[in-house]
Amino acid sequence: MNLARNVSTADFQRLDAAHHLHPFTDTRQLNAEKSRVMSKAHGVWLWDTDGNRYLDGMAGLWCTQIGHGRREVADAVHAQMMELEYSNTFFKTTHPPAARLSEVVAEVTPDGLNHVFFTNSGSEANDTVFRMVRYYWQLQDKPAKQIIIGRKYGYHGSTVAASALGGMDGMHKQAGMVPGVHHITPPHWFDFGGDMSREDFGVWAAKELERAIDELGEENVAAFIAEPIMGAGGVLIPPDSYWPEISRICSEREILLVVDEVICGFGRTGKWFGSDTYGLKPDLMPIAKGLSSGYLPIGGVMVADRVADVLIDKGGEFYHGYTYSGHPAACAAALENLRIMREERVVEHCAEEAAPYLQEKWRSFADHPLVGEARMVGLFGALELVPAKPGRTERFDPVGAVGTIARDFSFANGLIMRAVRDALVISPPLVITREEIDQLAKLVEKTLDDTLAELRKQGRIA
Ligand SMILES: *Cc1c(COP(=O)(O)O)cnc(C)c1O
C-alpha cells in the first residue's frame, strides 16, 4: 500500500497539524510552517511527497548505518513475522532471534562484554542502566552508592531517568530532575576551554570527575555515564588527553563506567565502537540506533563479565523488563543489519574509504568566513558557526538562531543536517560513496555561502 498515492502533501500536513505532537518540536511554529512529508528512501537519499530529493546527512537520526531501503532486512523481518511474530522473553522462554542476536552482539562489542539486556530504545537502555547500577551496588553491600555522574550537554534519552542522566537544561526545567544525578563540565574545548590548550583542558575536564567524586563522597557514587563523543550535544569530540585521564580515575576509584554507545556504536567513529576508538573498558554499555540501522526499534545494555557475574551469582530475580525486550522481528532486523555490516565490511568502508575522504573536505570548511571550528571523527562531525574569526571568542546572540537559519538553507538545498546551538552537525550513512560525499560537500559549501549572504543581508555580520 502506498499511503502517499492520491493524497496531496497538503492533506498530510493538515492531518499532522490537527493530531500529531512531534518530538522535540514547537508545535505551533511547526503547524505555521507545515511539516515536510517524507515518503520514500533508498541508500543515502530521501524523497518527500513533492518529489524533492534530500541527501540524508543525519543517517535518519544517527542510526541508518547501512543506508535506507535494504530489501534483505525487510525480507528477514517478513520471514520472522510469518514464523513467530511475537513471543516474550520473561517466563523461562527465549526464541531463536533473541538467542542468536545476544551471541552476535557479544561478538562485535569489545572483549569482556558478553551479556545483553534487550530494550526497545536507547532511552530504555539508560533507564535499565539507572536501575542496574544501583542494584549492583546493593548486591555488593554498598547501598549508599546511588549517585550517577553525567555531563552537561550529555544526551542519554528522553524518559524520566534518561533525561536526568543527560545534561540538557531545557529538558530538566520542563520536567524536573531525578535526585541522585550530578553533572560535570563536558570536554568541549571550543566553549569551555578558556585560555587552556586543548590537551590541558582535556585533563582538566577529566579531573572534573575526580573533583565530583571527592565532593560527593566516593561511598555515595555509583557510576559515571558518558558518550565517547557527545552526539546530540553537538558532536563534541574530546581532546585526546580526556579519555586516558578518565580511565585512570575510573580504575583508581570504586565506580562503574557506563559508556553510552547509542550513537558511537556500530561503526560511527570508524571502529565498531567508540570504546574501541578510545580504548575504553565499559562496565555497562547502552546500545541502540545502529544496532538495527533504524529498520525496527531495538536497544540494549551490554554488561561486562565482572558486573554480570555479580548480578547472576548474587542477584536473584531482577524486577525489570519490557514486554518487547528482545522482540523477534526487531531482533531479526538487527541480525540482518549486522550480517550486512560484517559481510559488506561497512565499518572498514567507513574507516578506510568514506571517513578519510569526507574528513579532508570537512576540515577545509574551517577556511570559510562563518566557520570557527570544523571537527570530525569517523563519519561524525560538526561545524561551529561564528560571527568573526578567529573563531572561539565571539558567539552569535541569541545562541541558536543562526544554526537554525543554516539548517533551513541546508534542507532547502537538499541536504539534511541538524543544528545544535550554532553548530551544524553531520552523521551520514556509513555506506556513503565518494561520489555522494562530493555531492554532500558541495551542498555544505552552498549552505554556508547562503547563510553568510543571509546574515549579511540581515546586518548580523560584517
Ligand atoms: C538517541 C540517544 C539515546 C536515546 O535513544 P532513543 O532510542 O531515542 O531512546 C541515548 N543515548 C544517546 C547517546 C543517544 O544519542
Image: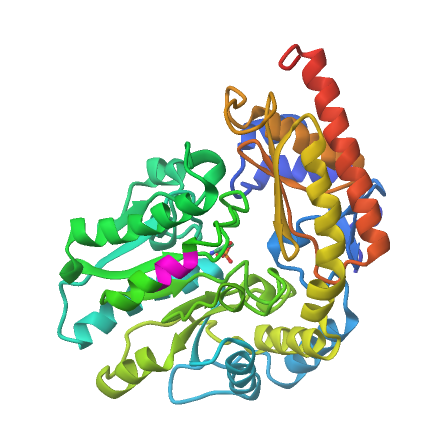
Quadrant location of residue 331? bottom right
Residue ID at (35%, 43%)? 185
Say if 385 sits above or below 159 in the image. Answer: above
What is the image's colouring? rainbow
**Quadrant including the C terminus:** top right
Say if 408 sits above or below 82 in the image. Answer: above
The residue stretch that appears in magenta: 243-247
Residue ID at (41%, 48%)? 202
Instruction: Judge whether residue 374 can be spotted in this image.
Output: yes
The residue lying toward the viewer, choosing from 449 and 142, is 449
Q: Main secondary structure of the magenta part?
A: helix
Residue 298 belongs to magenta span: no
Q: Residue 234 in the image: x percent, y percent?
A: 53, 43
Q: Residue 19 in the image: x percent, y percent?
A: 58, 40
The residue lying toward the viewer, choosing from 307 and 244, is 244
**Quadrant including the N terminus:** bottom right
The residue lying toward the viewer, choosing from 183 and 132, is 183
Instruction: Judge whether residue 66 can be spotted in this image.
Output: no
The residue lying toward the viewer, choosing from 160 and 37, is 160
Q: Residue furthest top?
A: 459
Q: Residue 22 in the image: x percent, y percent?
A: 55, 42
Q: Residue 143 in the image: x percent, y percent?
A: 14, 67
Residue ID at (65%, 65%)? 295
Say if 287 sits above or below 237 in the image. Answer: below
Residue ID at (73%, 48%)? 360
Quadrant location of residue 162? bottom left
Q: Is residue 76 left or right of residue 175?
A: right
